[in-house]
Amino acid sequence: MPLTPEDCKAMPQVRAEIDRIDEALVDLIAERFSYVDRAWHLKENPGDAYVPWRIQQVIDKVKARGRAKGLPPELTEALWRQMIGWFVQYEEEKLRQSQETVAKGHAPRDGSKGDGGAA
């Protein structure tokens, strides 16, 4: 059973709770990554990876959620911008690689719609 911060009477307890939370965060980020990995399959061009209005929409949502949970909005925004930036670069690279493969005469990637539309 998790301890509340107030129930932790010594640093080993605090560290154990932080480790528990870190494990859950990694699991959630891995789950999020699986959707990002799927997203690039549904896009056509590297330029489709960077969607400013969607990035801002996500930032606004997580900042509001973080604020409601007592997090500084600057922390929430910084974390998400870093994560989203990495994911955008990942998608761009995968899409570039896919274009190169298709240009060399190989079959399109699995799941490709081929309609030129961004997700």
Image: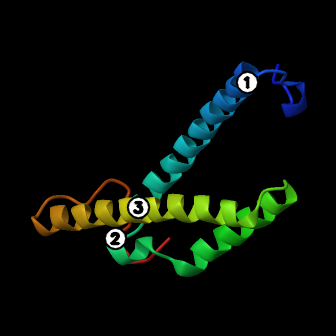
- Mark 2 or 1, nearer chain start: 1
Residue 54 appearing in the image: yes
How far apart in space, not on screen, are marks 1 and 3 (Cα)?
43 Å
How far apart in space, not on screen, are marks 3 and 2 (Cα)?
12 Å
Identify the residue at horizontal 83%, vertical 24% (top origin).
8
Q: Position of residue 32 (x, y in %)?
A: 56, 49
Q: Which residue is mark 2?
A: 114
| Looking at the image, residue 50 lies above or below residue 69 | below
**Quick check: 90 left or right of 103?**
right
Q: Position of residue 105 (x, y in %)?
A: 10, 64
Residue in the foreground of this view, choosing between 28 and 108? 28
**Quick check: 31 left or right of 73?**
left
Q: Answer yes or no: do the residues labelled 3 and 2 have beta carbons within 8 Å?
A: no
The quadrant holding residue 70 is bottom right
Residue in the foreground of this view, choosing between 115 and 83? 83
Identify which amino acid the numbered label 1 is placed on. Met
Identify which amino acid the numbered label 2 is placed on. Gly
Q: Position of residue 109 (x, y in %)?
A: 28, 57
Image quadrant where one finds the N terminus: top right
**Quick check: 34 left or right of 92?**
right
Q: Secondary structure at mark 1?
A: helix
Identify the residue at horizontal 81%, vertical 24% (top origin).
2
Report the residue that reaches farthest toward the bottom.
Answer: 53
Residue 45 appearing in the image: no
Q: Secondary structure at mark 3?
A: helix
Identify which amino acid the numbered label 3 is placed on. Trp
Checking the image for residue 100, the label placed there is none
Q: Which residue is mark 1?
A: 11
- Mark 3 or 2, nearer chain start: 3
Identify the residue at horizontal 40%, vertical 68% (top origin).
43
- Mark 1 or 3, nearer chain start: 1
